[in-house]
Amino acid sequence: MTDTQERNPGEPLRVGVLGARGRMGIEVCKAVDAADDLELVAAVDQGDDLSAVSGAGAQVVVDFTTPDVVMDNLRWCVEQGISAVVGTTGFTEQRLEQVRGWLAGKPDVSMVIAPNFGIGAVLMMQFAARAARYFESVEIIEQHHPRKLDAPSGTATHTARQIAQARAEAGLGPVPDATRDEVPGARGADIDGVRVHAVRATGLVAHQEVLFGTTGETLTIRHDSYDRVSFMPGVLLAVRAVRNHPGLTVGLDALLD
Ligand SMILES: NC(=O)C1=CN([C@@H]2O[C@H](COP(=O)(O)OP(=O)(O)OC[C@H]3O[C@@H](n4cnc5c(N)ncnc54)[C@H](OP(=O)(O)O)[C@@H]3O)[C@@H](O)[C@H]2O)C=CC1
Ligand SMILES: O=C(O)C1=N[C@H](C(=O)O)C[C@H](O)C1
């Protein structure tokens, strides 16, 4: 922690929000405002000056922006010595490595990057990873509102990677699939050998099904976020915890009891 970031006991933790006028940013600003132990000191969106965040002495930044701009934002946070909680999607392993590299030279700065802050969604991913070894077939169907910029979702990508890792550790081969002459896209995206189907429809918020199959039975694990308030307990948990978790933490799992 740098001197300017020191938290005096009893004083609220100073939080800056990037993407503050977006769907998630608006909810985060409300949630931080409503928490007695947190103070919203800066709310920044596209076109605003990031120096509002450092100028206000933010100790933690929350980023819900876009995959295009998030890396520049995070590099800036590290340079300023400000820890970050990141919900923005688009984190490849290469991007995560880059973030780890920046943090390596800054022991007082830490980050939590989570593809989904919904507690139910975190459990859905954990349950899916646990089930993966017992089923020869698996497909992921994610469903979101049509204004979402990225597909497949960060949650679906993360789930697919975890399932693929569990399958590899269990010695499972490829998912059986005899499809021929397919119409491009008909079988969804292939993420580490797991098919992921992205649905976009008005009325949806954020939903995911993981469908497992083996001889004579299927298992469906489903999670639904009907409202963006579902993400707020996880975001606030990460805001309060991030500075006690050195380096980069990926996913909310390590912060849950
Ligand atoms: N981890 C999780 O639990 C969740 C993650 N997400 C992810 O969070 C991200 C945001 O989602 P959502 O809120 O729906 O998207 P929105 O498009 O509603 O919000 C993004 C906001 O960021 C603004 N923005 C763009 N560039 C910058 C910049 N350089 N600095 C500051 N603000 C900027 C945008 O402005 P403008 O519109 O003018 O471009 C917009 O207001 C997505 O990647 C989404 O997948 C969403 C929900 C939950
Ligand atoms: O854009 C969204 O809305 C969401 N994005 C995240 C993702 O891509 O997984 C989390 C949640 O699904 C909502």
Image: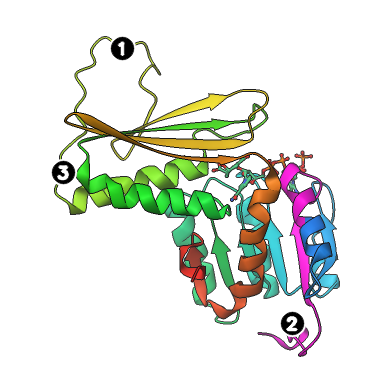
In the rendered structure, which amino acid carries the disc numbered 3?
Answer: Leu
Q: Is residue 210 magenta?
A: no
What residue is drawn where x is 81% and y is 73%? 36
What residue is drawn where x is 21% and y is 45%? 134
Q: Is residue 162 visible?
A: no
Side (left or right) of 31 relative to 148: right
Magenta span of residues: 1-28
Q: Is residue 90 visible?
A: yes
Label located before the other in sequence (3 or 1): 3
Report x, y in % for residue 90. 53, 45
Side (left or right) of 80 relative to 159: right
Give the SS element for disc 1: loop
Q: Is residue 235 above or below residue 23?
A: below
Q: Is residue 108 above or below residue 136?
A: below
Question: Which residue matches tag 3?
Answer: 172
Question: Which residue matches tag 1?
Answer: 182
Identify the residue at the far front of this view: 216
Report x, y in % for residue 190. 34, 32
> Residue 84 sits in which quadrant?
bottom right
Give the SS element for disc 2: helix
Label located before the other in sequence (2 or 3): 2
Q: Is residue 17 above or below residue 24?
A: below
Question: Which residue matches tag 2?
Answer: 5
In the rendered structure, which amino acid carries the disc numbered 2?
Answer: Gln
Ligand 2 within 8 Å, label 3 CB: no
